[in-house]
Image (cartoon, helix red, strand yellow):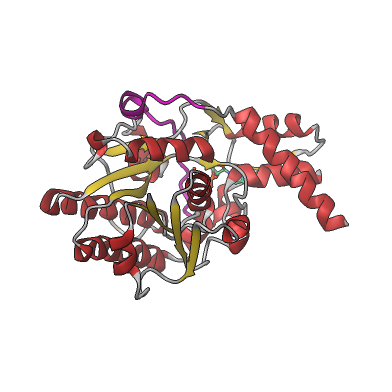
Amino acid sequence: MHVLITGGAGFIGSHIAAYHQAKGDLVHIVDDLSTGSLQNITLLLNEPNVRFHEADILVWPELERAAAWADRIYHMAAVVGMRRVLAEPTKTLAINIAGCERLLRAVRAGGWHPRIIIASTSEVYGAGDHAVYKHEHFEEDADLIFHSGFNSRQNYALSKFVDEALALSYAHMHGFQVTLTRFFNTIGPRQTGRYGMVVPRFVEQAVDGAPITVYGDGKQTRSFIDVRDTVRALDLLAGLPATAGEVVNVGNDREISILELAELVRDRAGSRSPIQFVSYEDAYGAGFEDCRRRRPVLDKLRSLTHMSFQWTLEDTIDELIAAARRKREEEAA
Ligand code: UDP
């Protein structure tokens, strides 16, 4: 199989690439390395069945050719990470919408029907406290609420929701075999804490014996899926004709509060890090509204794929702690 991965040097994209490389597929990665990094794919670059192209998909001249070559496309290229999304509102909208639109146009120009997976986000269910009260359910067919006025966090959800609408329109008009996957919090090896993601940050803080920074009261909840379970879910979804034209939540439904997560990471690391509460204002600036509760409804994913999870939160955290320790040892040496 020929697999094209946009954003393939990013956290999830690089795991998709590694998975297909190991299966013996021909893998073409395109990434402008703005969020992704070469380190994520170093080991893959020597493999004969992997090609990497450093390019911005908004202007990459070979996109049409790559889209016509591919049997399967994973569109993962996007501005992601709350810090970056908050800092770059115009870029978030422009890149996330225009990038997806250009990809869809390229596929159409290729005249061939690859199987397409497009990354969407659980943020479409509402990010702020207010929105989530109305959306306790997180079902794929729920009506969504967007607020008027400027809101840089919401821009991310909006950009992904427009991507969903674009892709569904192409599916409707041109028979595209596309599945929209709404990712819930995803964790695993090589995820960076640089853009604010909580698990890599807590792991590094615990390993360093530094204060573990819990934002707000720590009672907000999240549900974390290991990226290797995510990748299997995507492969299963892409392999099923019934998922074409569908929106599917991809996550793990074990819910944990952020304070419990801080304690869990600290315990697993055997660390003496104190837990330090930080106000949202200090963490993100004024006016930030956190999502109080996030847990995917997985009925659709389960009924379509019958998948079970291979990774528990504890297993993933243990592996991340071990990796962080190795990194510290290497730095010290
Ligand atoms: N968070 C935290 N400390 C940190 C980083 C994040 O308490 O150092 C919190 C954050 O406020 C949110 C949760 O952890 O409530 C998950 O944050 P992340 O940015 O990983 O994901 P998202 O908010 O997009 O679900």
Observer able to see residue 96: yes
Which residue is rendered at x = 53% and y = 58% of the image?
Answer: 83
In percent of width and height, residue 265 lies at 69, 34
For the C terminus, which image quadrant? bottom right
Residue 108 relative to residue 67: left or right: left
Q: Which residue is at a point 87% across and 56% down the rendered structure image?
A: 332
Range of residues picked out in magenta? 286-309
Residue lying at the far left in this picture: please name it.
Answer: 173
| Quarter of the rendered structure image containing ligand 1 | top right
Q: Nearer the viewer, residue 289 or 293?
A: 293
Residue at image point 47% right, 53% down: 287
Compare residues 274 and 108 and report the one nearer the observer: 108
Q: How far across and how far down the image is residue 55, in percent?
A: 45, 71
Up the image or down, 144 lies above or below 107; here it is: above
Type of secondary structure dominating the magenta stretch: loop
Residue 295 figure quarter? top left
- Residue 107, percent across and down? 25, 61
> Residue at horizontal 44%, vertical 34%?
251
Q: Quadrant of residue 37?
A: bottom right
In the rendered image, residue 123, in percent from the top left (x then y), is placed at 39, 45
Residue 142 visible somewhere in the drawing: no
